[in-house]
Image (cartoon, rainbow, N blue to C red):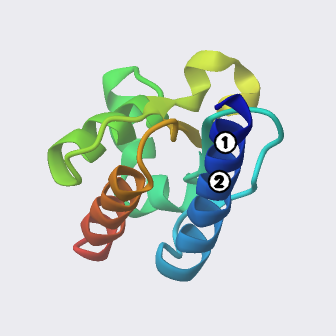
Amino acid sequence: WLGQLVDYIDGTHDFVEQYVEANIPDVSCVKPEGTFLAWLDVRRALDRVGAEATAAAEDRSPEAVFQEWLVNHAHIHINPGSIYGSGGAGRMRMNIATSRQLVERALANLRDALARV
């Protein structure tokens, strides 16, 4: 079962990378090695939703502002990369250790929410 799980998560990483590249121009993703977490580069999306200005006014990180924006507009909850250290700035961490259908739904919600901005 472990081999099947690793293969499934690897395939889900491929799916995320391809879906983001094809459908969400303000986000990018590079497939990591050895994890069930997708790291999404959201720097362009942060600019698009005004997260930098809001963060400065509220003394929060832009990623935290974007996290809240995603909950309210895309109905998804992913983690700000900045809480994992300075290398996570401008990124969000998405757990993809679930069904591919659920991952696709979350990405479609992200795509649709950004398209409405």
Identified by mark 2, the residue type is His
Residue at 64% in and 18% down: 84
On the rendered structure, is 91 left or right of 30?
A: left
Please tell me how crowded label 2 is: few (under 14), some (14-19), or many (20+) other residues with Cα within 10 Å: many
Image position, residue 24 (x, y; %): 48, 72
Establish if 18 lies above or below 59.
below
Establish if 90 lies above or below 85.
below
Residue at 47% in and 27% down: 61
On the rendered structure, is 105 left or right of 45?
A: left
Please tell me how crowded label 1 is: few (under 14), some (14-19), or many (20+) other residues with Cα within 10 Å: few
Establish if 111 lies above or below 63.
below
Image position, residue 49 (x, y; %): 34, 57
Mark 2 vs 1, N-terminal side: 1
Q: Secondary structure at mark 2?
A: helix
On the rendered structure, is 3 left or right of 53?
A: right
Evaluate whether residue 90 shows in this view.
no
Q: Quadrant of the N terminus?
A: top right
Q: Quadrant of the C terminus?
A: bottom left
Image position, residue 92 (x, y; %): 54, 39
Q: Which mark is residue 13?
A: 2
In depth, the one of 2 and 48 nearer the eye is 2
Q: Which mark is residue 79?
A: none
Numbered circles on residues, count: 2
Q: Secondary structure at mark 1?
A: helix
Tags 2 and 1 in contact by the CB under 8 Å rule? no
Query: How far apart, in angstroms, are the residues tagged by discs 2 and 1?
Result: 14 Å
Evaluate whether residue 111 shows in this view.
yes
In depth, the one of 16 and 67 nearer the eye is 16
Question: What residue sits right under mark 1 in the picture?
Answer: 4
Establish if 89 lies above or below 52.
above
> Which residue is outermost to the front?
1
